[in-house]
Amino acid sequence: MKINFILNDEEKTVDIQPDTRLVDLLRERFNLLSVKEGCGQGECGACTVIIDGKAVTSCLILVSQIEGSIIWTVEGLEKSGELEIFKKYFKKHGAVQCGYCTPGMVMSARALLNKNKHPDREEIRKAIAGNLCRCTGYNNIIDAITAIAEEGGFGV
Amino acid sequence: MSDLKYVGKSIPFKYADQKIAGDLKYVSDLSMPGMLHLKLLTAGIPRGKVKEIDTTRAEALDGVKKVYTFKNTPRRPFNGYYWYRDQEMIKDEVLLTDYVRHVGDRVAAVAAESSETAERACELIEVEYEKQEKPILDLEEALVGGDALHEKGNPFAEREFAYGDVDGLFAKTPSELIFSDKMETPKVHHAAMENHACLAYPEPQGKLTVISPCQLIFSVRLIISTLLDLPLNRVRVIKGNMGGSFGAKQETFLEPLAAFVARDLNRPVKIFFNRRESILATRTRSKILGKVKTAVSPEGKILGRDIDVIVDAGGYTSNGDIVSAAMAKKISRLYRIEHQRYHSYSVHTTTPPGGPCRGYGSPQIHALTEVNLDRAAAALGIDRVELRLKNLLHPHEKDLLGGPDIGNARIIEALEKGREEFNWTRKKKANQKSGRSGRYRRGIGVACATHVNGYYNVYPDFSGINIRFYEDGSILLNTSIHDLGTGARTIMAQIAGEVLEVDPEQITVLEGDTDRSPYDVGCHASRGTYVIGKAVQQAAVKLRELLLEETKKLAKNLPGVKPEEKLEVVIEEGRIRIGSDHYSYQEIISRIQLENQQELNVNYSYHSQANPASYGAHFVQAEVDTFTGLVEVKDYVAVHDVGQAINPLAVKTQIDGGVQMGIGMALMEEIDFDQKGYPLNTNFHDYHLINAPAMPEIRVFLIEDKEPHGPYGAKSIGEISTVPVAAAVVNAVNDALGKFLTTLPLTPPRIIDALY
């Protein structure tokens, strides 16, 4: 079936099996390799993307569900320049180790900042509750997101 | 410390930008033209002999290239732990088995044009078993039951380490001064976020190249070469970018299969596991069942200790014997104990194999001994920190078991620092006041721990380094390091940069590639910073000497210099001074190349000179909800004796990550099985990790008192950071409840069971 959506600020139309998972569409058709797969059941958050403003695990979404949606991945934030502030503070606060969970973390953080400009640490913890990380113990990631929120410039 | 320019600085990790942007390709992201996807059919039953495998329907599926079983793959047994030639060990694993020993065992594999096709074909393979045999799950039963999963039977290994007169001591110690515990630690999934992956492809002249996110490229090469009868120079193994390991990717078991199929079909072949396969078909933290008996004087001096352990190796031997020796070697490196014995049996069970896992047995053995010490402290009415302080080793004190010098051991300072920062005494009084009543009960816990710095005197422990100055002043540092995501490349650049007075940004650090990099025994045993880092430091010193030597030759020919004039040549702040003139590296190195016709290139091989102990003291405040059995960690202080932090932020992140893993082991992480041997949790839906809301803030403090043989005085942190955690958390929960719970993890049902 044909599906239309906006991906990283570009209009797209694909002809595809409706039961294809979004993670596969993004990785295989569009080569968006920031979208990682860690569990395939929506439990680890490595495949998190933003759909219509919300952080969503793309392994649980079928392409038939995305007609007319606005989808963002880290590659889109890179293109729009928004990723710079994430790079700056994720690096500064040691929020990146192996990096496999990082793009998903960035997308969850970005979705949070879209609706809450000044989240406290507890709100940040909740926003990334679905993003598992085995390397960092999360606190450095929370430090980074706090610093990004403080510098501001996002959403609402 | 202020004289250090790059060491001791929290420099951001190399490649962090690429990781954030998703530009860094992990092995699971790689693809090649003509690449086939190899999907494994793993066993759905715990145990049974394969009677027949019917692959015809799978083979008929469009897009399937070939189906593999035990019938058409090499039968030579191996052990994924094999890392140097002629190493003695039990080899009982094959690429694809005809006898299933655990759910998840490798039964067949399908090579297909797409991963979906390979997966569908796997579902079409029909496996008939002779009969489903009885599982082996209970460790004590396994020991005496006479049921053999392998030829050697159970137990397949026994170890004893002892010194002093343990029997004599216990015979004369009154029973009220002997404290016993029995503890079970869980089979834990490493949970690296990237599932296991590897890519193998054929090259001209019968050569095979494998890209693997591994920890020992030379071990992967050795095992492939042995199984496929290829000379070492026909196998090339490249360390690929890795989404975490924690020991899960230390052993070799997938790469030989991918390499075999790549050769067989003359096509690139990729394996990329899903989470279920990573949990069931790789390695786990070995479960142990331990008993400990400790004699303590009324004043709190530990007089002697007797430890008995059963190690659950799972379905295959892997490191199931070696990990026990590793546990034994920790018992004499923390406290001064004059009489001690450690005895162990290792058994096979019908569960996924144990293997290397961050700490390599240390978290398990410390859980047993540190929880037991709390029992002694409670019975004797001695403060738990005080009891430990009375017995901890002093710097350079002897390891009575005969292990290497413990070095500049600063555990006493670490424990004292932790007591102060945690406010131990105040928290303890507050707890005593509130008593053990009410729904929410708070407790505090402490644990001390020790771990290693490499393999000195036990195994080969050397590292080759190639380091080159380019003519623009930048540096190529060619190592066999495997960056597991810990920032190892950044650490190496900081060390080399410090010696050569070059910004680490200007230093490219290469990871292992068996064809291109010098030999190193691998990134395990916490030897990265301490051994490889020292090798880098020494190699950089040699390069610095070579630069000066060649500059001196050059100086004679500089314009305006008289031949008899002896000019001083020195390096100052990253520049070269000849007499009173200053030159950049770039100017000098270019001229060395042109005029001396010499490349500034050093090959250097270093072997370790010692294996000091690293230490940590962790303090935990936990709150138990006595209605639900849920535990929340409220406060956490971690103090580590690291010699010198090369990169303090990297050290902090290691500790935070180590704590995350350890709390999981204490409270929730366990690959569990039903009575028939089927796993109960095969994805993150039912195998839970500590997530962000459950993770406490960690207050980290470092004791930095230099270790003689470490690079700039540094010693290890990656593994030790997770060693005391489970013990400290359990001690805090036990303190809250006034109990001595010893079956880990302390899940809500176990806590509720203990309460009511």
Image: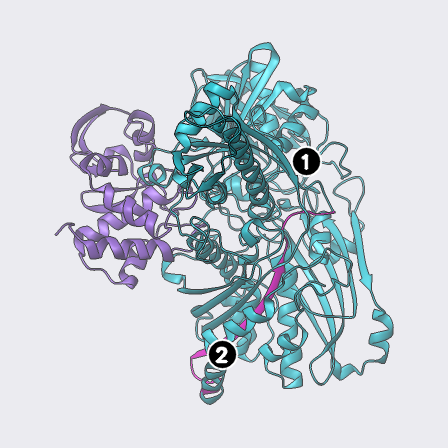
Helix, strand or loop at mark 1: loop
Q: Is residue B378 above or below residue A42?
A: below
Q: Quadrant of residue B397?
A: bottom right
Q: Determine if the magenta segment contains residue B451.
A: yes
Q: Nearer the viewer, residue B412 or B83?
A: B412
Identify the residue at horizontal 55%, vertical 40% (top origin).
B541
Identify the residue at horizontal 48%, vertical 86% (top origin).
B429
Q: Nearer the viewer, residue B159 or B347?
A: B159
Question: What type is the residue that disc 2 sits on?
Answer: Trp
Chain that the image shows in cyan = B
Residue behind mark 2: B424
Q: Nearer the viewer, residue B483 or B544?
A: B544
Residue B52: horizontal and vertical position, in percent? 66, 26
Residue behind mark 1: B83
The stretch in magenta equals: B434-457
Kindly identify which chain the residue marked by label 1 belongs to: B
Q: Is residue B416 above or below residue B233?
A: below
Q: Is residue B427 left or right of residue B183?
A: left
Q: Is residue A19 left or right of residue B120?
A: left
Closer to the N terminus: mark 1 or mark 2?
A: 1
Identify the residue at horizontal 86%, vertical 71% (top origin).
B167
Residue at the limit of the structure toward the bottom, as seen here: B433
Identify the residue at horizontal 27%, vertical 61% (top origin).
A123
Colour given to chain A in the rendered image: purple
Residue B452: horizontal and vertical position, in percent? 64, 54
